[in-house]
Amino acid sequence: MNLLEVKSVSKTYGTGETAVHALKNVSFSVPKGEFVAVVGESGSGKSTLLNMIGALDTPTTGKVLIDGQEIFNMKDEQRTIFRRRNIGFIFQAFNLIPELNVEQNITFPVLLDYQKPDQAYVEEILTVLNLKERRHHLPRQLSGAQQQRVAIGRALITRPMLILADEPTGNLDTHNSGEVIGLLKNASKRYEQTIIMITHNRSIASAADRVLQVSDGVLTDFGRCTG
């Protein structure tokens, strides 16, 4: 079953001669549990695509279905709740809350939804991400790789169906980049989560199950990775 379906999505900014066609009739689907990398140069439209999938921006035309639900048919409040409960975001800049420690940053999305964190699952995430010894540390007391692990934990905590990662290794060195990608692959398999990851690094992309390329707003599917 396809968890994600993108159907004829286009996005145009502006009108007339100054119009910018960021996405041009993009269509693809992603089965549950697949780890997909989206590659492309800066300005190619890949971040715009991620914003459409994450319901952070609205397409000019087309549909985005997550688990069979058309997200842009929802009312704003309904879409916000759906996004909070079903989509996890991982950003290049980490976006951790400076005043909260590791465990508090990870559980923040659950508290934001007025829910009580599942402490056993919190412990599991801290263990999987090798953060148990850092649970009471503030972000400024962590390395870049450790901060990115916290960001991954925050994305996992709501048990989302879909995780969207925007250049998650952009601020990391080669060794730590490999570690973070390994953690994402492990999450995809361990928790059966679908992951869409943007990267400009083709070596990083090759670790995914499948690679898509966006160039000048047009999507090409390179299919499943081998080896």
Image (spheres, rainbow, N blue to C red):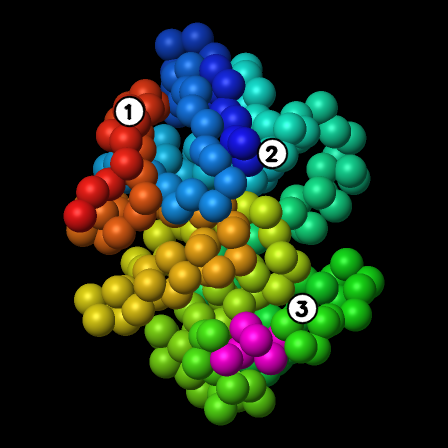
At a point 35% along the width and 73% down the height, the residue shown is 145
Instruction: Tell me which label, 1 or 2, sits earlier in the chain.
Output: 2
At a point 68% along the width and 50% down the height, the residue shown is 84
Query: Residue 171: x, y in percent?
Result: 31, 64
Above or below, comparing residue 90 to residue 218 in the picture: below
Please name whichever residue, 57 or 178, is drawn nearer the observer in this view of the structure: 178
Residue 219 visible in the current orientation:
yes
- Please state which amino acid type lies under the numbered disc 3: Phe
Quarter in which the N terminus is drawn: top right
Location of mark 2 (residue): 66
Instruction: Tell me which label, 1 or 3, sits earlier in the chain.
Output: 3
Chain part drawn in magenta: 122-127
- CA distance separating discs 2 and 3: 23 Å
Disc 2 crowd, CA 10 A, few/some/many (<14, 14-19, 20+): many
27 within the magenta span? no
Location of mark 3 (residue): 108
- Please state which amino acid type lies under the numbered disc 1: Thr
